[in-house]
Image (cartoon, rainbow, N blue to C red):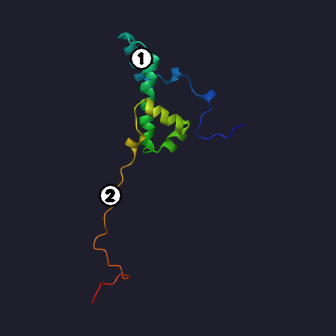
Amino acid sequence: MNAMNENMIPFEEKPSLNSFTGKFGDLAVRIQHLLEIGEKDLYRRLTHELDRTILDVILKHVQGNQVHASELLGISRTTLRMKLRSLEMNAEDYLKPKEPETPAENPLPNPAIRPFSF
């Protein structure tokens, strides 16, 4: 038997989709709305929206780190990159901005450097 992270719920113990209605009611409302307006190709459209949302939340959480994102998602980095490309997303957009390096205020001169004199 594979070792499992203590926080993970085995698939067979996970609640059914119906039990998520309260938490994800807006998804059911979205599906109902698309049905009412006669949209076609719902599965592709909804999985595209869901994938984009999942990746957006995960990449924000890991600040664009693809290694951590792929580990959290349980997919390979290659698969993650293919997904990002297909959704026209870029992990670099989620990188934490680097703070500009500021020189130290009134730095002391290096004692090893002597002024040039004649």
**Where in the figure is residue 96, as x and y percent of width and height?**
38, 48
Binning the other alpha carbons within 10 Å of mark 2 as few (below 14), some (14 to 19) or many (20 upward) gives: few
Q: Are marks 1 and 2 in contact (CB under 8 Å)?
A: no
Q: Secondary structure at mark 1?
A: helix
At mark 2, the secondary structure is loop
The first of marks 1 and 2 along the sequence is 1
Residue 33's place in the image compared with 85, above or below, is: above
* Disc 2 target residue: 100
Residue extending furthest front? 118
> The N terminus lies in which quarter of the figure?
top right
Q: Position of residue 94 (x, y in %)?
A: 39, 43
Q: Which mark is residue 31?
A: 1
Image position, residue 47 (x, y; %): 46, 23
**Residue at far bottom of view:** 118
Q: Residue at x 67, y 41 (%)?
A: 3
Q: Residues within 10 Å of mark 1 (few under 14, many from 20)?
A: some
Left or right for 87, reference 6: left
| Amino acid type, label 1 | Ile
- Position of 57 with respect to 107 (left or right) is right
Q: For the residue marked with disc 2, what is the amino acid? A: Pro
Instruction: Classify the position of the C terminus by image quarter.
Output: bottom left
Q: Quadrant of residue 56?
A: top left
State how many labels appear: 2
Q: Whole-percent x and y of residue 106?
A: 28, 73
Height in image: 75 above or below 110? Answer: above
